[in-house]
Amino acid sequence: MSLTTVVRAASGIVAVAVVMLSLSASAAATLAGDPVKGKEVYVECAGCHDLKENRIGPHHCGVVGRKAGSLADFPGYSQAMKDSGLTWDVATLDNFLKEPFSFVSGTLMGYFGIEDKQARLDVIAYLQQAGGDPALCSKP
Ligand code: HEC
C-alpha cells in the first residue's frame, strides 16, 4: 500500500466519522424527549387525564396526530378547542403545554402549563410512545 492510499483511506474514515457525528446530533435533536422521564411528568396530567378513559379531560391514546377537540365521545370540549383548527403534533403540543390559556384562548383545561421545555418534550415523547404501545393503548 502506497502512502497516498493510506492517507486517502484515513481521510475516508474521518469523513465517515464526521457524517456519523452529524447524523447522531440531528437524531438527538428530533428525539429530544425522553418517554421514561415523560411518564413521571404525566403524573401532573393524570388528575384529569387517562390514556384510555375520558375523565375531566379527553383520553390521550392516539392524541399525537389527532385533530384538537375531535373525540366524538368526549362531551367536555370548549368551543375554543373545537374551533382551534389545530392538529396535535410535537410543535402544537409543545406550544399548548407551555401556555394552555394563551395558545388556545378560551380552553377549559384548568392547568397552567409546564415551564420547562425539556419536561414538555419528555411528556410529549411519552404520549407518542404510549399511543403506539398496544399494552397501554390497544388498537382502535
Ligand atoms: C385540571 C385538569 C387538567 C390537567 C391537570 C391537564 N388537563 Fe389536559 N385537558 C383538560 C381538559 C378539561 C381538556 C379539554 C379542554 C378544552 O376543550 O378546552 C384538556 C385537553 C387536553 C388536550 C387536547 C386533547 C384533544 O383531544 O384535543 C391535550 C393534548 C391535553 N389536555 C394534554 C394535557 C397534558 C399533557 C397534561 C399534563 C402535562 C394535561 N393536559 C393536564 C384538563 C386537564
Image (cartoon, rainbow, N blue to C red):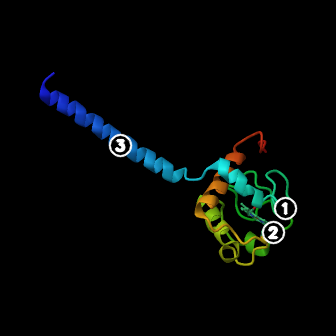
Q: Position of residue 76 (x, y in %)?
A: 85, 67
**Kind of residue at disc 1:** Phe
Callout 1: CB less than 8 Å from ligand 1: yes
CA–CA distance between discs 3 and 1? 48 Å
Callout 2: CB less than 8 Å from ligand 1: yes
> Label 2, on which residue?
77
Q: Secondary structure at mark 3?
A: helix
Residue 17 vs residue 106, the one in the foreground: 17
**Kind of residue at disc 3:** Val
114 with respect to 75 (left or right): left
Q: Position of residue 7 (x, y in %)?
A: 18, 32
CA–CA distance between discs 2 and 1? 7 Å
Q: Find residue 19 and name its label.
A: 3
Residues at circles 2 and 1 in contact by the CB criterion of under 8 Å = yes
Discs 3/1, front: 3
Give the residue displayed 29% in from the left and 34% down from the top.
13
Give the residue displayed 44% in from the left and 45% down from the top.
24
> Label 1, on which residue?
74
Q: Where is the C terminus found, in terms of image quarters?
A: top right
**Kind of residue at disc 2:** Tyr
CA–CA distance between discs 3 and 2? 47 Å
**Mark positioned earlier in the residue sequence (3 or 1):** 3
Q: Relative to residue 118, is residue 136 depicted above or below?
A: above
Q: Secondary structure at mark 2?
A: loop
Q: Position of residue 43 (x, y in %)?
A: 77, 56
